[in-house]
Image (spheres, rainbow, N blue to C red):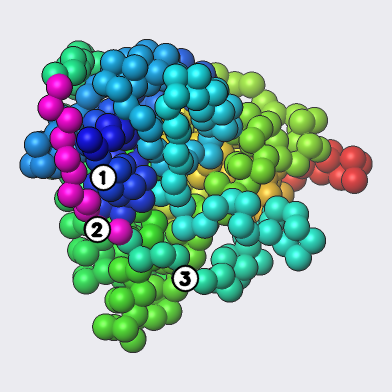
Amino acid sequence: MADVSLYWFRDDLRLSDLPGLAAAAQAGHVIPIFVRDPDLGDAWRIGSASQWWLHHSLLSLRTHLSEQGLELILKSGATVPVLSALAAQTGATTVYCSRHYQPWAGALETTLKERLSKQGVGLKRYPGTLLYEPEDVATGGGTPFKVFTPFWRACNRRPDPHQPVPVPELTPHNDLIESEELLDWGLLPTSPNWALDWNDLWHPGEAGAQTALTQFLDHHVQDYGDGRDIPAEPNTSKLSPYLRFGNLSPRQVWHAAQASKLERPEAVGSIEKFLSEIGWREFCYHLLFHFPTMPDEAFNPKFSFFPWDDDPERLIAWQRGKTGYPIVDAGMRELWQTGFMHNRVRMVVASFLTKHLLLNWRAGEKWFWDCLLDADIASNACSWQWVGGSGADASPYFRIFNPITQGEKFDKAGTYTRRWVPEVADLPDKYLHKPWEAPDDVLSAAGVRLGETYPLPIVDHKTAREAALSAYGTLKSLD
C-alpha cells in the first residue's frame, strides 16, 4: 500500500521545480496543504499588498492541483499543531516541505520535527527558494560574506544550479478532508478596494510567472544593462513578486537566462547584469540566515547611536507622495497605486527618507513591507540598510541622492513623473523636477499653485544634505 504524505506549501506556490513535491509524489499519495499561521513572524506577518498576491497565488495553485485531481487543503492556526493533527487524521508517514531561512524558520522546523517524530511521522525539507544553500557559500576562512561582489563571484565559481525538475505526476488521497474557504481569510481589500485595478497589472501564480519570465527574456532583457535605471521604460523584469511567493524558482530564472545567452549572444552583458540582481537576492538571504536580527537591528552597531529624527508629519508626507520633490512623490504614488516601485526610484525615495528627512530606515522598511507586492524580509531589510548606510556592503554615508538631478538624469523626458504626479504634468521639462524654481508665469500657465495644488518642498536639498553629513559625521568618533 502506498504511503500518504503531506506536502506543506509555504513560499513555494507552484508545482514545477519543487524538489520536495517531486519526492512526495514518488513516495505515494500526496495531500497538499497551506497553513495560514496568524502568529508566525510576529511583527513581520505578511503585509496588506502581499496578502492580495497570496490570495491569487493560492487560487492559481488550487487550479493547477485540481487538474491532477488534488484539492489544496487550507487551514488556519499554529503551524505545528495543525500539521500534527492532519498527519494523525490522514495516517501520513511524512511531511515534505521547502526549507525556509527567515529568523523564525529554523526554530519552527525543529519544533515541528520533534512533534511529528513522537507520532512516528518524518519531516523532510528540500531546497527550493534559493540557488545555493546559505551554509554552502563562505569566505576562504569559512565565515559569511559581508560584501556582495566577492559573494557573487564565489557563487559563480560553484557548480551550476541543478536543472529545474518538471511538474510531478501526483496521486491524490481520496479521503475527504475538511478545508477552509479562501475568501473567508479576508486577504483581499474591500472597503475600500485599493487593489481594484491590480488584476489588469499583475497575474499572480505559476502561469503568470512563466509568461512574465518569457516576455522579459524575449523582448526586454537586451535593454536591461543600460535601460534598467529608466523608470518610464519596460526594461526591468518585474519578477520579484513571483519569486517572493515562489510562483517561480530562482533555478528556473537562472537556467532560462543561460539559455537566452546562447540564443542572443549580443545580450550577454545585460543578462549577466540581470543575473547579478538574482545574486543580490541570494546575498540578502545569505545575510539574513547568518545575521537574523537584520530586519530589526542595524547591521553596523555604530548606527544604534545614530541621531535619527522623529517627525510624524514628514513621514506621512513621504508615505503619501507629498514631499514637493516630484520624482520622490512619483515613486511613492506608484507604490500605493500598483504595489510596486521601480528599483532606481526605490533607492531615491529611500535615500530621501533616511538622508534628507533623517528618519529611521525602519520606518521605510515597515511601509514597504505593507505596500509592496514583493515585500521580502531579506531583500527589504538588506536594501533599506544598504541605502541608510547601516548595512553590510552599505552605500557610503556621504552618498546622498539629489532628487532633482536623479529625476533629470533618469526621467529626462518626464514621462514617469508626469504619469504619477499629474499636478505638475504641464510644467516644461526644465522645471518639472524643481517646480519651486519656475517663474510665476510658468507655474500659472501649467496650472500649478505651489502650496495649494502641489506642495512646496518639505525640506531644502542643500540644507538637508549638510544636516545629513553632520549627523553621519557623529559616528566617526565611534571608529
Q: Amino acid at mark 2?
A: Pro
Q: Amino acid at mark 1?
A: Ala
> Pointer 3: residues within 10 angstroms few (<14), some, or many (20+)?
few
- Name the foreground residue: 177 vs 453: 177
Name the mark on residue 166: 2
Q: Is residue 94 above or below residue 219?
A: above
The secondary structure that most of the magenta stretch takes on is loop
Mark 3 or mark 1: which comes first in sequence? 1
Label 3 – label 1 distance at C-alpha = 25 Å
Judging by the rendered image, the residue that carries numbered circle 3 is 160
Quarter of the image where one finds residue 188: top left
Q: Helix, strand or loop at disc 1?
A: helix
Q: Which residues are magenta?
A: 165-175
Name the mark on residue 91: none
Which callout, 1 or 2, points to the residue nearer the camera? 1
Q: Amino acid at mark 3?
A: Asp
Quarter of the image where one finds residue 13: top left
- Residue 223 appears in the figure: no
**Relative to 169, 147 lies left or right:** right
- Residue 275 appears in the figure: yes
Q: Quadrant of the N terminus?
A: top left
Query: What percent of the width, then of the height, locates residue 110?
Result: 56, 28
Would you say residue 378 sits in the magenta stretch? Answer: no
Residue plotted at (26% across, 69% down): 217
Name the mark on residue 25: 1
